[in-house]
Image: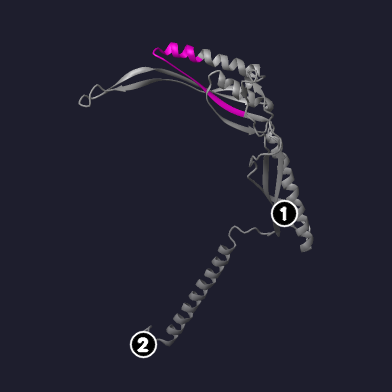
Amino acid sequence: METLTTNPRFKNAAIVLAILLIALVAVRIVRESKEISYVGAPENMQNMITVSGKGEVLATPDIATFSYTVSEEALVVSDAQKKATDKSNAILAQIKAAGIEDKDIKTTSYNIYPRYDYQSSSIYVPGKQILAGYVVSQTVEVKVRKLETAGTLLTSIGEYGADNISGLSFSVDKQEDLMRDARDKAITDARDQAKKLANALGVRLGSITSFYESSPYQPMYYAKDAMISASVANGGAAMAPELPAGESKIVSNVTITYSIK
């Protein structure tokens, strides 16, 4: 008796069905692979060019900034505070007499802490800490807008007892305006390069598709011929230091992408 497995017709039908299944699976795989390859791709791809531009602005600093510290010590906190306050007031009076406004004077730190001495009567007896006094310390930051007075001011406050006069640095007051000028120059530079490139390629520039700015402000100070003139403090008793004004360079780097037609 002939079974289904030995029937030639059944074998042929099975083979045809297997071929159809393989073909359907292959078609589906090809379709899915095409869909994956286009995931995230825009329907209408635009041709684009990307250019970079650089803009620089040079400016002579018009602000000098420095800091100083007033420090006093006493066995009683209130005594140390009074001594520090008297010295600080004398220095502040000198600073204001030089034309420095209140807005350009600020306290950056004020500290009160005990100071101990270590005493030991014998190498065989453990030593102990003994209170030596209380220290009151105040640090003040000052901005000088008349650079020609900076050297004299540094000398005078040192003579009034200021400690740790440091951090003298130069900066530009209207920094944001200069940053905008540098950025405008960088954009103009990038636009000119884009036009030249478009002409060389025989295409026309379209709209801007992206804009990026890096390192909008990079100050670099270097000495120049202009110097703050030295002056004599206290009737010629001491010479004020000569302070190079220098120059600051503000740099803007931009990257712009244009569509092309």
Q: Nearer the viewer, mark 2 or mark 1?
A: 1
Asked if the magenta segment contains residue 71, the reply would be yes
Q: Residue at x 76, y 48 (%)?
A: 188
Few, some or many residues within 10 Å of mark 2 (<14, 14–19, 20+): few
Height in image: 238 above or below 219?
above
Amino acid type for the residue under numbered disc 2: Glu
At label 1, the amino acid type is Tyr
Q: Point out which mark residue 2 bears.
A: 2
> From what the image shows, is residue 55 above or below residue 8?
above
Q: Nearer the viewer, residue 185 or 66?
A: 66
Q: Position of residue 20 (x, y in %)?
A: 50, 76
The answer to which image quadrant residue 227 occupies is top right
Q: Secondary structure at mark 2?
A: loop
What is the basis of the colouring in this image?
one colour
Q: Nearer the viewer, residue 167 or 240?
A: 240
Q: Earlier in the sequence, mark 2 or mark 1?
A: 2
Mark 1 highlights which residue?
258
> Can residue 261 be seen in the rendering of this structure?
no
